[in-house]
Image: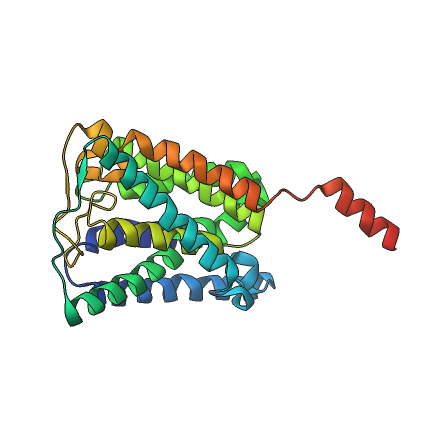
Amino acid sequence: MWIGAMILLATILPSLRGRTSPWVLLLGESVSFGAAFGMAMVMGNLERRPIGAFGLPLEGAFGKLFWLGCLVGLGEVSLLIGLIATFGGYSFGHVLLSGSSLVNMAFAWGVFFVVVGLLEEFLFRGYTQFTLADGLGFWPAAIALSCSFGLVHLRNPGEGWVGAVSVVAIGLVFCFALKRTGNLWFCVGMHAAFDYGETFLYSVPDSGVMFDGHLSSASLHGPAWLTGGSVGPEGTVFSFLTMGLVALVIHFLFPAKPRAVAQSAVAESQ
């Protein structure tokens, strides 16, 4: 039941994006996240598990991990755009917003992408990841769901196969972060900040979608390997480089806990 509902939501949502203002889009994303979270609560009650077991513990909501994820996500997208610009593929253009319009759009896109991060991370790396990992193992489940994550993005109007592969790769990076941190709050922050940077700050396509209400008249120009073409920066070769760097950052920020040492410590305390 849950997996069927997840596939239905993930199939419908990309076709609704990029069509109107962030405030209207926010309503749809919020309802979808509420539905996904609500279904997980029902399943958790049936399985006698706390909702926090599925990746979004309430006690960690918007805490240190979330803001650290935001910093990493913003750093990644800034590095990515910087690399494209260094090779002549990106121009910022001129600022399109000012005054109340600037404040409204900056805030609206921020809130919208936090909800997008919550929804997509919970759909693909929350209850479904937890449940599949219980039967298949963590990484087989992560690979299957990350591939689904990429396929869903192919429904976006400007998306392509290179962009979809990039989405699969970032899905695996998010799973790596989940494995190391133990929950999804870092992933939510990173996801939200990266999308915010693409759409608003740097004003480029986000997974093949060019939203209205962005900051500048920015443009991408040059071969698709450099700019990502209609996909946007996620389709450039540099995207795989920056994702590899992010994986290294996660590795050093959140070292793996040695099981043997932990089990020994538990045994000695008994």
Quadrant of the image occupied by residue 222 = top left
Q: Residue at x 77, y 43 (%)?
A: 261
Which of the pair 162/86 is nearer the observer?
Answer: 86
Quadrant of the image occupied by residue 223 = top left
Which of the pair 73/9 is nearer the observer?
Answer: 73
Q: Residue at x 52, y 36 (%)?
A: 140
The percent coordinates of residue 83 (x first, y second) are 29, 35
Q: Is residue 69 above or below residue 231?
A: below
Q: Is residue 174 above or below residue 18?
A: above
Q: Is residue 251 left or right of residue 189?
A: right
The percent coordinates of residue 47 (x first, y second) are 58, 61
The percent coordinates of residue 239 (x first, y second) are 33, 35
Residue 224 visible somewhere in the drawing: yes
* Numbered circles on residues, count: 0
Which of the pair 217/27 is nearer the observer?
Answer: 217
Q: Residue at x 17, y 72 (%)?
A: 100
Q: Is residue 257 left or right of residue 233?
A: right
Which of the pair 139/48 is nearer the observer?
Answer: 139
How has the structure been colored for display?
A: rainbow
Q: Is residue 1 left or right of residue 210?
A: right
Residue 24 visible somewhere in the drawing: no
The percent coordinates of residue 92 (x first, y second) are 17, 46
Quadrant in which the C terminus appears: bottom right
Quadrant in which the N terminus appears: bottom left
